[in-house]
Image (cartoon, grey):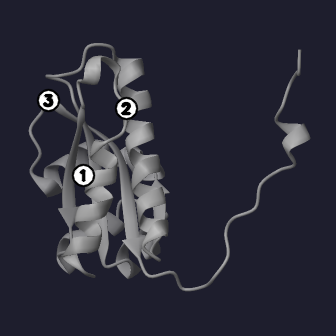
């Protein structure tokens, strides 16, 4: 995959909003097949990690964090920006969270310092098929219109 496309994804992520503009996100870009294989073994979504040529591990830097919940929300915005930037470039991406059950093993494989908390893994590649996921009807998620 072209490095320029990954850099655009990271740039979009970097422009996400964050409380007090603390920008608490940190990234590890993973292209090495052996590392991706080790990570794939830690989740039921392993096939996605194996098949995608790039994965980006997203971390929360607790040394710049001022309010954990707000910073986790900022990380979510950062990841959404990544997904949108990937889509705009004709790429497919998947936000993987189930791997969080093995956060310490991920940090060990990637040799990450203790002050960084693993938040998600985003797998990126060229989509195998066209289309998007489905959604429940809007009226099922809007509780009230007051």
- Quarter of the figure that contains the C terminus: top right
- 104 vs 19, nearest the viewer: 19
Q: Which mark is residue 120?
A: none
- The label nearer to you, 1 versus 2, is 2
User: Residue 115: which disc?
Assistant: 3
Mark 3 residue element? loop
* Left or right: residue 131 compared with residue 117: right
Q: What is the CA distance from the residue labelled 1 to the residue labelled 2?
A: 26 Å
> Which one is nearer the viewer's eye here, 40 or 83?
83
Residue 17: give its label. 2
Tell me: residue 20, above or below residue 132: above
Q: Residue at x 19, y 47 (%)?
A: 107
- Residue found at x 51% / y 81%: 127
Crowd tier of the residue under label 2, counting other residues whose Cα lies within 10 Å: few below 14, some 14–19, many 20 or above: some
- The residue lying at 42 percent from left, 73 percent from top is 89
Name the element at disc 1.
helix
Q: Are marks 3 and 2 in contact (CB under 8 Å)?
A: no
x then y, percent, for residue 37: 28, 74
Q: Between disc 1 and disc 2, whose residue precedes? A: 2
Residue in the picture at 87% in, 48% down: 137
Label 1: how many Cα within 10 Å (few below 14, some 14–19, many 20+):
many
């Amino acid at each position: 995959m072209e490095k320029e496309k990954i850099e655009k994804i990271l740039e979009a992520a970097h422009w996400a909003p964050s409380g007090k503009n603390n920008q608490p996100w940190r990234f590890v870009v993973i292209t090495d097949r052996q590392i991706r294989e080790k990570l794939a073994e830690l989740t039921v979504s392993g096939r996605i990690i194996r098949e995608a040529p790039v994965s980006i591990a997203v971390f929360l830097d607790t040394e710049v964090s001022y309010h954990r919940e707000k910073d986790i929300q900022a990380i979510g915005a950062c990841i959404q920006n990544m997904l949108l930037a990937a889509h705009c470039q004709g790429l497919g991406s998947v936000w993987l969270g189930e791997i969080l059950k093995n956060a310490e093993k991920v940090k060990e494989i990637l040799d990450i310092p203790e002050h960084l908390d693993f938040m998600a893994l985003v797998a990126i590649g060229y989509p195998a098929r066209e289309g998007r996921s489905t959604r429940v009807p809007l009226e099922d998620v809007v509780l009230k219109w007051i």
